[in-house]
Structures are given as C-alpha cells and as structure tokens.
Image (cartoon, rainbow, N blue to C red):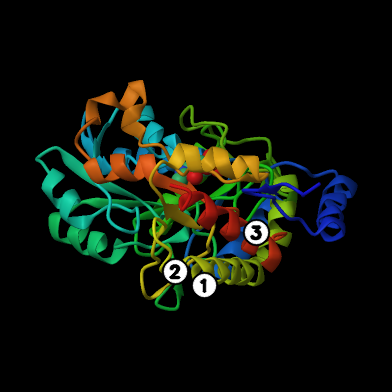
Amino acid sequence: MIDPIQLFVPFFRVEETLSEIRECLEQGWTGLGFKTVQMEEAWKNYTSLPNAHFLNSATAGLHLAIRLIKEEEGWKEGDEIITTPLTFVSTNHAILYERLTPVFADIDEYLCLDPVSVENRITEGTRAVMFVGLGGNVGQLDKIVALCQERGLKLILDASHMAGTYWNGKHIGNEADVSVFSFQAVKNLPTGDSGMICFREIKLDEEVRKWTWLGIDKDTFSRTISKGAYKWHYDTVHEGFKYHGNSIMAGIGLVSLKYLDRDNAYRRQIAAWYDERLQGKSGIQRVPVRSGCLSSRHLYQIQVDNRDEVMLALNDEKIYPGVHYRDNTLYKMYAQGRGTCPRSMEASERIISLPMHLKLTYRDVQRVCDALIEIVNRG
Ligand SMILES: Cc1ncc(COP(=O)(O)O)c(C=O)c1O
C-alpha cells in the first residue's frame, strides 16, 4: 500500500501553538485585542511594513481595501478596477461587493497580470489595478507599480500567497497602496481563518479599525486596560462590518509566523527538487519565478497538455495535485470578460499545482516526478 501524497498538508507546532491558545483561555480573552495586537506587532516587525490590522480573512481585507480607498477617492458605482481572471474568486468578488466593475487583463509567463495588457485596458473609468502575486511570485509587479504611478491609479496587492515573499531583499507589500495577506487554513502561514490588511498610509490604518468592528471606534480590550471612567462610552460612526480577527487565530498565527522563513526555505528546497527533475522534460513546462523574487513558494506550478487526464492519472498513483485557478471568466457571473484574456484561458486549461507542503520528503518529490514524467510521455 502506497501512501497518498496530498497537495497541501498544513503543519502546526502543536505544543507551542496549544500554549498560545491556553494563554488565551486562562486569561479569558479569546476575542479582539490581546493576541490580535501581538500578531499585528509581530507582523509589522517581521515585514517592516508600517501598518497592519489583523482580520478574520483576506476576503474581508480585500473588501475593506476597496471600500476605504473608494470612500477616500470618491469613486462612483461602476468605476473600473483592472484585475486578473486567474485567481481565487475572492479577489474579484471584493470588487463587486463595492459595486465597481472588474475589467480583466491578461497574464504573463509568471501567471500574474501582464503590464502591457493592463495598460491596454485603461480607460477614463479606470481607478485602480488589483495585482495577485500568484503562488508567492512577484511577477512584473514593479512595472505595474510604475504604470499606476504614471497613470494616477491606485494599486491593491492581493498578497494572499505572499507571506514571506521578498523582492530585492525586502518583504513584499509596501509597493502597493494596500496589501492583503491570507492566513487561511491551507496557506503557507496557516491559522484556521484569518488575514492581515496593511495600508501604506497610517490614516487608513486608523480608519480600517473602525470598519472591522461594526463602526465602533474603540476596541473592548483597550477600553478594559485604559482604567478611565466612562469606558463604556464609545461612539459608533457607521455600520462597518464584523471583520476583525480573534486571539485564538492570532495565537496560532504567532507561532506559524515565528517559523515562516524557515518553513518557506523548505518550500523553496522542494521547488528546487522539482526543478532539478523536471527541467528540460518534454511536455512539462515549469512556471518561472521572477528573478529578484524570493518566493514564499505557496505553490509550485507547471503546465501540461491534457491536464485533466494527467491529473486523473496522477490520482491513480495516489498523488493529488490541484489547480490554481480556473479562469474566473469561465464562471457565469464573470462571463462578460470571456474571450478577452486568451493567455489566461489557455493557462487555465493547462496548469497543475504539484504537492507543496512541509511534510513532503525528497522521496515524495521523486515519486511525484517519476509518475508525472511517465504519464506525460505515455502519449
Ligand atoms: C489569491 C487569493 N485571494 C484571496 C483569497 C482569500 O483568502 P481568505 O480565505 O483568507 O479569505 C485566497 C484564498 O484562497 C486566495 O488564494
């Protein structure tokens, strides 16, 4: 009996994580404040980003990124955000939550937005570009930054896969007006569900804290520790949302964060093993990482012909890869963009994410490669 090899197997330091959670239970503080504050500080310290607010998901963060910039800039319903079709639907749903229009641009060899295609999609109605660092790759983000500056557009970075991605020696995030990270259950910095929103401007960081707790402008924890009178007197400035993170998730995240660089280094080792075996193999095209990018390696992606058959044949060998992602214009709700991004549509039919997690061994990687090479060459 051979063991199955799964796409993702999240890894937790169980005892260390339990002691963080135990602290929350012993203190009787599992909600907003306490560990969420520690997590924000630890994240700022780790990334050197100036601002960070801990959330219950990256989806919430993407929504708020758009909401706050829309309010600040006075965008109107129907204004356009240029975005990628090759992403998880959260990226594009967030645009619709604010009744803006997603305009799809095509992708490049890194499976990220192609700056030339983005430029071609700019109209009078364009307000921002939404860039996704797929799998931890920076793609041509630098060119998108320059384009946004030149054309007066805001830049939102969906950095859901980019915890621990460095670009020319610096942690990713400060290139954009706002960056949103995901610490969802199977991400490379796993919790249960949570995320971080990092605005470049402190003003928006202060503002977003009101939006994540129903428009209330002071959190319970700071009211409890500030011993002044009338601590129950707080203002509610608008309806906001219930989007803040909690201390249990933050406790899990604090431990994951402590080991993030080490864990990502092992992911890059796995990627190097794949590269070594797969380079030059006919019928298997590896997705490159942009030079200067130290990728988090949330994903290791390849492209093949007859992808669905290859996936099923791998399943027969008890190997379970994934697809990140189907082109969003294949979904009914985004069908208006169908046919506008041929490279994305082609990639969507050909991409496979090979198993990538911390429990994989060198032998596992060889088993995946042996099976893949054999299947692709069956003809
Ligand atoms: C590219 C991308 N954007 C956004 C999200 C949403 O993250 P979350 O599950 O934390 O809301 C994900 C998660 O799968 C993602 O992969």
- Mark 3 and mark 2: Cα distance apart in space: 16 Å
Mark 1 lies on a secondary structure that is helix
**Helix, strand or loop at disc 3?**
helix
Image coordinates for residue 213, horizontal then vertical, percent: 57, 36
Closer to the camera, 132 or 67?
132
Q: Amino acid at mark 3?
A: Arg
Question: Is 7 positioned to the left or the right of 27 in the image?
Answer: left
> Which quarter of the figure has residue 328?
top left
Residue 361 seen in render: no
Q: Which residue is mark 3?
A: 367
Q: Residue furthest bottom?
A: 169
Q: Amino acid at mark 1?
A: Glu
Element at label 2: loop
Residue named by callout 1:
276
Three-letter amino acid code of the residue under disc 2? Gln
Query: Residue drawn at (40%, 40%), measured in percent from left and top?
Result: 91
Q: Residues within 10 Å of mark 1 (few under 14, many from 20)?
A: few
In this rendering, the answer to whether 54 lies above or below 287 is above
Decide if ligand 1 comes within 8 Å of the CB at mark 1. no
Q: Pick the residue in front: 189 or 301.
A: 301
Q: CA distance from mark 2 to mark 1?
A: 6 Å
Residue 333 in sight: yes
Residue 251 image point, x, y percent: 74, 53
Image quadrant in which you'd find residue 45: bottom right
Label 3 or label 2, whichever comes before in sequence order? 2
Label 2 close to label 1 by CB (< 8 Å): yes
Distance of label 1 from label 3 (alpha carbons)? 14 Å
